[in-house]
Image (cartoon, helix red, strand yellow):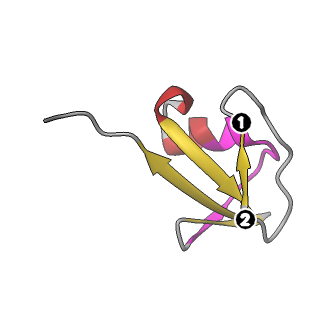
Amino acid sequence: MKVIVNEKEHQLTEKDLHSLFKDLKINPEVVVVEKNGEIIPRKNNCELKDGDRLEIIKFVGGG
């Protein structure tokens, strides 16, 4: 299955958001995810389907 993450194609074997985080080594506590134009609440896991488009934005601290 293929999904588009931040305009790059990724091949997945698992079909949920938390598995994608593991594959990409992303801490879900410091990101916001938009799936096909809708914000996914941080605590939610969701099923991913072939062709889904995701935008993952990471919070960066500093001053």
How many residues crowd mark 1 within 10 Å: few (<14), some (14–19), many (20+)?
few
Specify the quadrant that holds the C terminus: top left
Residue at 78% of width from left, 34% of height from top? 45
Residue at 52% of width from left, 26% of height from top? 29
Q: Is mark 2 on a helix, strand or loop?
A: loop
Residue type highlighted by circle 1 = Pro
Nearest the eye: 2 or 31: 31
How many residues crowd mark 2 within 10 Å: few (<14), some (14–19), many (20+)?
few
Say if mark 2 contacts mark 1, CB within 8 Å.
Answer: no
Residue 5 pos. (x, y %): 59, 63
The magenta stretch is: 8-20
Residue 13, magenta (yes or no): yes
Residue at 47% of width from left, 51% of height from top? 57
Residue that badge 2 annotates: 37
Please give the count of numbered marks on the rendered protein: 2
Specify the quadrant that holds the N terminus: bottom right
